[in-house]
Image: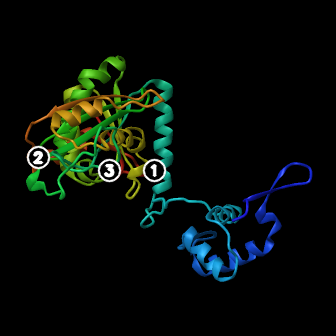
Amino acid sequence: LESDRIRKPGGGAKKKTDTHPEWKKAFLEVVSEHMAGDPQDESIVWLNIKTPAIRRELHKRDIDISDYIVRQLVCESGLKTRSFRKDIPMRKVEGRNEQFEKINMVRKMCAEHNIPIISIDTKKKELVGNFKRQGTVLCTAAPKAFDHDFATFSDGTIVPHGIYDIAHNTGYLTIGTSHDTSEFVCDNIEDCWNRHLRKAYPDARMLVILCDGGGSNSSSHHIVKQDFMRLAERIGIQIVVMHYPPYCSKYNPIEHRLFSHISRFWSGAPLISVADACNRAAKTVTKTGLKVFSRVVKKVYETGRKISDGYREELARRVIFDTELHNWNYLINHA
């Protein structure tokens, strides 16, 4: 094949695609048969054909060019390799935007008045043992792992629960070996408060918690509110709980500021033991100064617990619900 570039008379380089407009025309004719598009946005299209296949189709039209030239034509057409983003809500949620506005307002207030605000969530459970993990690792030879991810061959399952201090860019990871329950979550917050947050916020009279609305943080389960009331009693301050709307948990800061980085430090090599998972999580750092503290909790947590007698009377006395979005926002008094 000829050189991919020719020289202009003035000495500058000129693309061969500029001197062969018939290539561009043929290229557009080929890819037009392999285009798909976004039904909500006519400006977004993508191709289901690869560069070598485009070159072969052009060859059938007596245009013999290299993959490099085809890639130039792709680039000049505004096409670029991208991945799909999970960014479309599954359904319309009433009050979604209003809740985000409230959360943003509270975050600004916390920053201005040095009020502790934490983001919490439970990362997906992980098998402990010699199981393959996504990613690569520096090693002297290709390591080997089990050919199937069967839980029966594991040394147990870990439940990683995280707490992210937004103001100080600090994460606290508790690796449980039992169940992901609201009691487990509140125990972790209490430990984090006593070990770390109380020292970071010595004058705090309130703790703001951002979380999603499902699982151990459910916005609709009474047992969650009961455990939050018990937590407020133990740490002796008011607690404000703000749930993200349904299908919006990815906006919870802990997801992209803590869990994504821990996943990077867990990638490549298997989580051989609970201690190994804990130690590798504690080594998580970023250029922006993220620090992570980790610990292991082997306490067994009971599932299916019931609310206690007198719960509703206590709820009415101690919990103040938001007048507009009461399902997602409430303040819990410590006494």
* Residue beneath the point at 48% across and 59% down: 85
Q: Amino acid at mark 1?
A: Gln
Task: State the CA–CA distance, disc 1 to disc 2.
Answer: 38 Å
Q: Quadrant of the N terminus?
A: bottom right
Above or below for 239 versus 307: above
Horizontal arrangement in the rendering, residue 45 relative to residue 328 (left or right) = right
Task: State the CA–CA distance, disc 3 to disc 2.
Answer: 19 Å
- Of badges 3 and 2, the one in the foreground is 3
Q: Quadrant of residue 261?
A: top left
Horizontal arrangement in the rendering, residue 167 relative to residue 145 (left or right) = right
Q: Residue furthest front?
A: 1
Q: Position of residue 230 (x, y in %)?
A: 18, 35
Mark 2 lies on residue: 156
Q: Amino acid at mark 3?
A: Gln
Q: Amino acid at mark 2?
A: Gly
Residue neighbourhood size for the residue with mark 1, other residues' Cα within 10 Å, grouped as few (<14), some (14–19), many (≥20): some
Mark 3 lies on residue: 134
Mark 1 lies on residue: 99
Q: Position of residue 134 (x, y in %)?
A: 32, 50
Q: Secondary structure at mark 3?
A: loop
Q: Position of residue 281 (x, y in %)?
A: 29, 34
Q: Residue furthest right?
A: 10
Residue neighbourhood size for the residue with mark 2, other residues' Cα within 10 Å, grouped as few (<14), some (14–19), many (≥20): some
Residue 225's tag is none
* Residue beneath the point at 38% across and 43% down: 260
The reply to whether discs 1 and 2 touch (Cβ–Cβ < 8 Å) is no
Q: Position of residue 136 (x, y in %)?
A: 35, 45
Is tag 1's residue or tag 2's residue first in the polypeptide sequence?
1
